[in-house]
Image: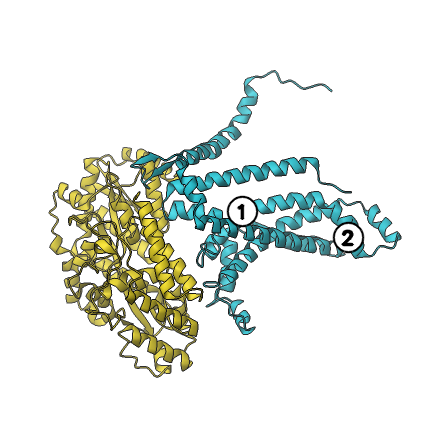
Amino acid sequence: MKTANLWAIGLMALPMAAQAQTEISWWHAMTGANSEVVEKIASDFNASQSDYVVKPVFKGTYPETLNAGIAAFRAGQSPDIIQVFDVGTGVMMGAQGAIKPVAEVLGEAGFTFDKSEYLPGIVGYYSSPEGEMLSFPYNSSAPIMFYNKDIFEKAGLDVNTPPKTWAEVWAAARQIKESGAATCGYTSTWLTWIHTENFAAWNNVSWGSNENGLAGTPELAVNGPLFVKHFQEMADLAKEGVFVYGGRTSEAKQNFTSGECGILTESSGGLGDIVKAGINYGIGQLPYDETATGAPQNTVPGGASLWVMGGKSDEVYKGVGTFFNYLSQTEVQQYLHEVSGYLPVTMAAYEATKASGFYETNPAREVPITQMMGKAPTENSKGVRAPNLPQIRDILNEEFEKMLAGQQTAEQAMTAAAERGNAAIRDATGG
Amino acid sequence: MRRTVFPHKLLPWLLLAPQLAITLIFFYWPAAQAFRQSVLREDPFGLSSQFVGLANFRKVLNDPAYLNAAQVTVVFSVLVAFFAMTIALFLAVQVEKIVRGKGLYRTLMIWPYAVAPAIAGMLWLFMFNPSFGTLAWPLRQLGINWNPLLDGEQAMALVVAAATWKQISYNFLFFVAGLQAIPKSLLEAAAIDGATKRRAFWTIVFPLLTPTTFFLLVVNTVYALFDTFGIIHAVTSGGPGKSTETLVYKVYNDGFVNLIMGDSAAQSVILMVIVISLTAFQFRFIEKRVHYG
């Protein structure tokens, strides 16, 4: 709140100096190399025209940025643009009056917003049930599989054919452990995002009713038979020490980069750290369950999008619209995709990257896109949404941890998670 | 005795103003906000707000997760206060026996106090991380299945150790001061009467230290309750499951992660009541000076 005030004071003092230019504040949560991308995009935009100045401000982690935005809104000093992570999408959508839909902003600024120019899997996730795009997909990622080629070789596995199904992953992981090639066969970051939300989409099973919550309040279905089967397999592997749990978010990446584990499922955005670790790695598609009909379907995007806050002047909205139009330009998207490892959001940028031969030298970089675009999404694979998704994830994580510690079976864990999650959803919707 | 009366009416107020302003802005105002928030049910953005009376309190007190957090807090606080004080007392007594370099030992002992809680947490996390921790490896070699990421008791042990380590310095300082205040004549008299060192400690030193011990007990409890947020946040984030989620951590988690403002505010009001009673308790008893000397 204090920094929000200071920022507001700063804003009031500045227009004197640059009278003709309208300032647009952009709160974001990007660190390291990705924050340099934010700075570069903003300064390039500022240099490209003279009416608007976009000022990026780093506000901490994703949840911290969201909280700062909410606190600032309550104090009447919200930023113009705020970056909100995927799980915060439901919270923002529920806040009509606090936000202004991106499609509207673009339209009022005199740009035509053509949905068909954007990757359908991404736009679908950030749209209202009526199909209006609500936020601008700035950085989208997809879960993929990384494997350590040296460990594969030591274990006598074929380094050029990564396992495709979960059953194959379990077998490979066991072989890695039993052959002594590594102490751990398989690990995964983000169990909730990868093993429930994307697991549902990729295997075309329901995560929750009402199109996984996209068409209304969901009733969780994570206690379905396929989830129970999958998690029981993971619990058994954990008991054997073949699967090692790293933590609730991206901690497990270290178990992979340290050479402890042979296989990892992680966000495509995690590529940078794996490259930096100097591991002889390979990339494969996210595994699917071979017993699921129609699998693999398509994965759903993670990452974050840019939301426009409500109650600003027309001049500001015009500037935001101009900026978003600039962001969707092919060269900007191509730069973003190639440097940061996030997905391009427009078809044109994807085609341009393809044409440039980038995927021939970096074939693995296309995997998350083909995964998301492979098939037209079904009602199980457009993404998941709940008014309190962060809380649902917490509940799931707590039950997973108890299960992996051997205190309960997968069936008990998933039943408890669904019950507690549904109670929390009812609470959040005032039901 | 003559009371000094200053002629100015305004000056005292002026001198008090900065402190009063700070108290009003940083304590009374947020506290009032918390009270207000605790009887409302609001969406995160505050767009719609509904008066619900004491419903939030009823909900919180009937929530099994809240009772779990209360239990975790009691276990955590008792362990931290007990270990932080016993170890500090032991070290303080040992330092008294050193003839040369007392100052150096004391300085070294006081250092950890300067470490911020979050940093302390990170240090312990790095040492005991199951995959790359330098001390996790020897534990494994000893045949201990060390995995605080999944084992709730080990996670608790880890946060207790980190919180204790940080607090030992503070307690040490007070115990050293307390020991120095004990008249040498009493100890000499005991020695002449043929009392062993151990007996002299338990019958003379320990009872004379009671005021210090009692003061530290209250301070340590308050520390374990409220100042350990950074350590828990850095080491376990309340997990695995909910096995290290204390009351303070739950306020943060419900309010700032899950954005349930009403519940979170109700919980902080309850915490406020706990602090006020603890402080009242301390004043009542410390003023009377628990003293058996």
Within 10 angstroms of label 1, few (less than 14), some, or many (20 or more) residues? Answer: many
**Residue A261, above or below A347:** below
Query: Chain for mark 2?
Result: B
Q: Chain of mark 1?
A: B
Does residue A2 appear left or right of residue B232 in this picture? left
The residue closer to the viewer here, A359 or A393, is A393
Depth order, front residue of A39/B47: B47
Label 1: which secondary element = helix
Q: Residue A347 at x, y = what percent?
A: 14, 59
Q: Are marks 1 and 2 on the same chain?
A: yes
Q: Say the numbered circle drawn on residue A12.
A: none
- In the rendered structure, the answer to whether residue A263 lies left or right of residue A365 reads right
Depth check: give the residue in front, B58 or A62.
B58
Identify the residue under disc 1: B225
Left or right: A259 in relation to A163: right
Disc 2 marks a residue whose amino acid type is Phe
Q: Quadrant of the C terminus of chain A?
A: top left
Residue A267 makes an appearance in the image: yes
Q: Are marks 1 and 2 in contact (CB under 8 Å)?
A: no
Can you identify the residue that label 2 sits on?
B201
Q: What shade does chain A have? A: yellow
Give the image location of residue B63, x and y in percent.
43, 47
Mark 1 or mark 2: which comes first in sequence? 2
Residue that protrudes farthest toward the top in the picture? B7
